[in-house]
Image (cartoon, grey):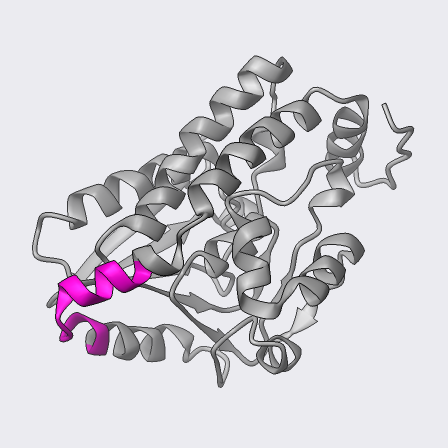
Amino acid sequence: MDAPVMRVVAEKQGAVLTLTLDYPARRNALAMPLRREIEEAMEAASSDGTRAVVITGAGGHFCSGGDISGMDVKGIVDGRERMRRTHRFIQLMAFGNLPVVAAVEGYCVGAGLSLACISDTVIAGDTAKLGAGFGKIGLMADLGLPFTLPQRVGVAKARQILLYHKQYSAAEALAMDLVDEVVPAGQALAVAQERAAFLAEQAPAPMALTRQMLAQGLHDALEVERHFQAALFATGDFREGRDAFLNKRQPVFKGV
């Protein structure tokens, strides 16, 4: 049997690089190989004349979250190393010199929401669905979301999004500043590329320093996240949540 398609497609138009998550079997779930490919693409873009990046998903969806089928984490040490490796692309997106625009269609949940919120601008198609939902599998939000989500929507609303697992429509997301602009379904990528083209024409140094100023505090948040999430990977509740998800049943959490 052929291996499923799992790749990040990089296409450059002028000074704008578009990165497309292409993992149709899992609605572009953010598997570890995809995280590495984003990191490599962002690293290469920092020195090849790219001035702005668009990130999007193939097949009508942005990203359905982490790839739960690949979360075979063996203890706290393994979990800490997983988080250390995955934080590298988040740090590149947040502290690198290139502004990032997210083009969101379809599902943008879990790690997908983290990916959107680490971006500078989020353009959503009007049928997009956004939410967190990490607790459904016994984990906390990660990839910087506990830091970036309150920056976007405020602490009180972030608390509700993270604790109650509700999926929000694009209109609801716009009303709370979770996204920056809503466009007709299917148009998010084109509009995101327009916004990125504008950013690519601006003076790069002030933009880079502004972005880095706004991201102050993220390093510390990621370090705390690394320890907390690694501990959760080692719990029985995570194993139960993962098994329940893969077998399409309701989890029964026991607090262990």
Asked whether, in this view, residue 73 is left or right of residue 10, the answer is right
Observer-nearest of 154 and 19: 154
Asked whether, in this view, residue 82 is left or right of residue 38, the answer is right
Tell me the residue at 48%/21% (across/down): 81
Observer-nearest of 253 and 189: 253
Q: Residue furthest bottom?
A: 184
Q: Is residue 1 visible?
A: no
74 up-or-down from 32: above or below: above
Asked whether, in this view, residue 124 is left or right of residue 165, the answer is left
Tell me the residue at 19%/66% (across/down): 206
Tell me the residue at 88%/28% (across/down): 255
Horizontal and vertical percent position of residue 32: 45, 33
Horizontal and vertical percent position of residue 156: 72, 65
Observer-nearest of 70 and 179: 179
Residue 243 included in the magenta stretch of the image: no
Magenta span: predominant SS is: helix
Residue 202 included in the magenta stretch of the image: yes
Horizontal and vertical percent position of residue 240: 81, 28
Q: Please report the bounds of the magenta region as a residue range.
A: 198-211
14 up-or-down from 213: above or below: below
Q: Is residue 206 visible?
A: yes
Horizontal and vertical percent position of residue 166: 76, 62
Observer-nearest of 111 and 218: 218
Tell me the residue at 24%/45% (across/down): 41
Counting labels gives 0
Q: Give the quadrant of the C terminus.
A: top right
When asked about the image quadrant of residue 118, the answer is bottom left
When asked about the image quadrant of residue 178, the answer is bottom right
